[in-house]
Every structure is written in C-alpha cells, then in structure tokens.
Image (cartoon, rainbow, N blue to C red):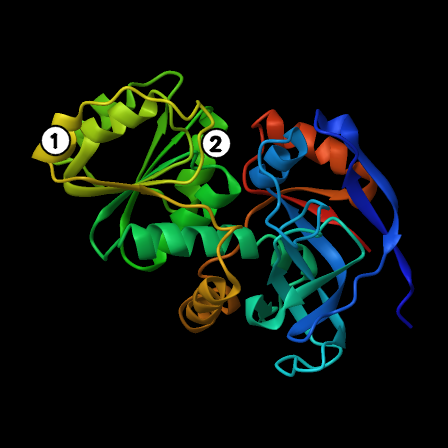
Amino acid sequence: MIPTEMRAVEITQPGGPDVLQVGMFPVPEPEEHEVLIRIYAAGVNRSDVAQRQGIYPPPSRASTLPGLEIAGEVVARGKNASRYPLGAKVMALVPGGGYAEFATADERNVLSVPKNMDYIHAAAIPETFFTVWSNVFQCGQLSKGEILLIHGGSSGVGTTAIQLAKAFGSFVIITAGTTEKCKACLDLGADLAINYRTQDFVKEINEFTHKKGVNVILDMIGGNYTELNYKIASVEGRIVQIAFLNGYKATINLNTLMVKRLIHTGSTLRAQDISFKAEIANTLQKKVWPLLENRTVYPLIDEIMPLDQAAKAHEHMEKSAHIGKIVLKVS
C-alpha cells in the first residue's frame, strides 16, 4: 500500500543547517513517463547546501524539497512508463525531492542498482557519476594516457573522478587539505596527491609533469585557483568548472589562455533537460555499470545518517572533513 503522506525534509527558509526540518507532505503521483520510488537512501551534495542557503533554487516544476540522488524500489508507474517493473531496485537522478520517503523520477533518468550493491552505495552514485562523466569525459574529453587534475580530490565527485579516470587509463593528480585525505586519494589510485595547505601545487605539478602541465582540470574551487589552473594546464588543456567554493570572481591572464590554446568551460547538471541526462544514463549503463558490478569502481562512503539528521549531515559537509559521500538512510 502506498500512503497518501510521507516524511520529508523541507527548507523552512534560507539559512544554516537548522532550517532543515522534517515534516509530513503528500506523496507525489508519477506523471506520464515517471515512476514513483520508495526511497531507502538519499545522497547529500553541495548543491543541496547551496539550495538551503538560498543561492541555488530548483528548476521550474521541480520539487522544492532538497535531494538530487536516491535509491529505492519502484512502487508505481505513470501510464506510459514501462522500462522498470514494480519492485525493481533502482537509483535515480532527480531535480529535487530526494530527502523524502517517496519521490518521482522520469524513467529515462533512472538506472538499475548494480548487482550485489546495497541501497546506501547506490544512493551515492547518480549525482557524482553523472557529474563526472558529463564534465570529465564529455566536456573535458579526457583520454587514455592523459593527466587529470582534480581539485577537491577527497569529495564525492573527486573520489568518483579518481576511480573512473584510472579505470579508463589516465593519470590522476589531486589536491586536498589534509594528510588523511591525500592518503585516501592515493589508496583509490591517484598518482600524486598534494596537500594544498603545506605544498605549492603549481610547483609540485610542474615537477611531476616536467613542466608539460596537465591535460584536464576538474575544478570546484574557482576564485584564485583560476589563474593557477591556467599556469599548470598543458597546451590545449581543458579546464572544467563545476563549482566556486573560493568565489566566482577571478583575475586571469588571457594571454595564457591564447598562447596555450586553452578551453575553459563550465556546467551545471541540475538544470539540464531530461534527454541530456538520459544520454548520460545510457552511457553509464554501458561503460561504467560493468565496472561497478566487478568493483573496479565503487562509491566511497564517509557517513551514513538517518533522514531526521539531515541538518547534521549538512553541518558535516560544510566542515569539509568528509572523504567520499554522505548518505541519508531513509528507511
């Protein structure tokens, strides 16, 4: 039986973690191409924090509840949704509504849970794997034998990018803020881990690459890192911006951009349309799901917290002490 009401976390007003409150809300009904998923686990992301702070509103028609990635069981289907049967174990990328007991998802943005994987790990996949694939491999065009630099290597996105880049034959350099985080990234396969608090990453990268630079940079820092990225990028290097933890303004030397023939691009995933995300989902199913099933690649979990502790989960994320993903256990 599907209830008419569900527990969910709402953002009562823009502000700190304390504005996240658990309440009762109507269970959503699936539209024509959607499925209704009983959620067992939901991933926590920086995008959720930004939405809570009032600086990253959900797309039009999306749920105003936070949460972009979920894992659970299909319990109802729209009249033209036929890809997943009732009872199917799935994960989904959703534009909102993940911090809840139920959510709807367009079936084209839904993927089967890989065999022998639990819901907690499955919930740690959609946002990070979609983000890494679209930015590193599609926008960044990372190829076998090239060097990828990841700023924020110990984050959920970072730990995913390390594993995928290594699985497809690339070299990986990361920056992180503690010895523990650097070690965790090396354990995942990174070829060089740089503690940006104690080391000059420009100097370290120049030494590692014999001043040839790195081919692709995945940057979630922005600010003063932007000009440094230009310095350490290779000729025809690609810089992909996915966030701005150090701010969205930077002073740059455009001559470096021209001389090196650099490409500096950026993207947001949440606002992309369903068909764009569906193409990523199909590619992940073909190229990455076999790696998940044989555990060549696997999501790294930092903390598991109950839905009632969503505020605590946000506090933990904002401290930037986590290594890997923070996941809410819903039921």
Q: Residue furthest top?
A: 198
Residue 192 rendering spot, x and y as whole percentages: 31, 36
Q: Nearer the viewer, mark 1 or mark 2?
A: 1
Residue 67 left/right relative to 125: right
Q: Are marks 1 and 2 in contact (CB under 8 Å)?
A: no
**Residue at image mark 1:** 211
Q: Nearer the viewer, residue 253 or 289?
A: 253
| Disc 1 residue crowd, few under 14, some 14–19, many 20+, Cα 10 Å | some
Task: Determine the residue positioned at 40% across, 17% down.
Answer: 197
Q: Secondary structure at mark 2?
A: helix
Position of residue 85 in the picture relative to residue 323 (left or right): right
80 and 157: which is toward the camera: 80
Look at mark 2 in the image and give the residue it sits on. 181
Dividing the image into 4 quarters, which one contains the N terminus?
bottom right
Tell me the distance, in whole angstroms, between the alpha carbons under discs 1 and 2: 25 Å
The quadrant in which residue 261 appears is: top left
Which amino acid lies under the numbered mark 1 shown in the image of this protein? Lys
Q: Is 235 situated left or right of 295 in this image?
A: left
Q: Position of residue 182 (x, y in %)?
A: 42, 32
The residue lying at 8 percent from left, 33 percent from top is 259
Answer above or below: position of 275 versus 184. Answer: below
> Residue 24's spot in the image, x, y percent?
90, 48
Query: Eyeballing the image, is 198 above or below 116?
Result: above
In the picture, the quarter occupied by the C terminus is bottom right
Dot 2, how many residues are within 10 Å of its Cα: few (below 14), some (14-19), or many (20+)? many
The disc, 1 or 2, on the residue closer to the chain's N-terminal end is 2
Secondary element under disc 1, as helix, strand or loop, is loop
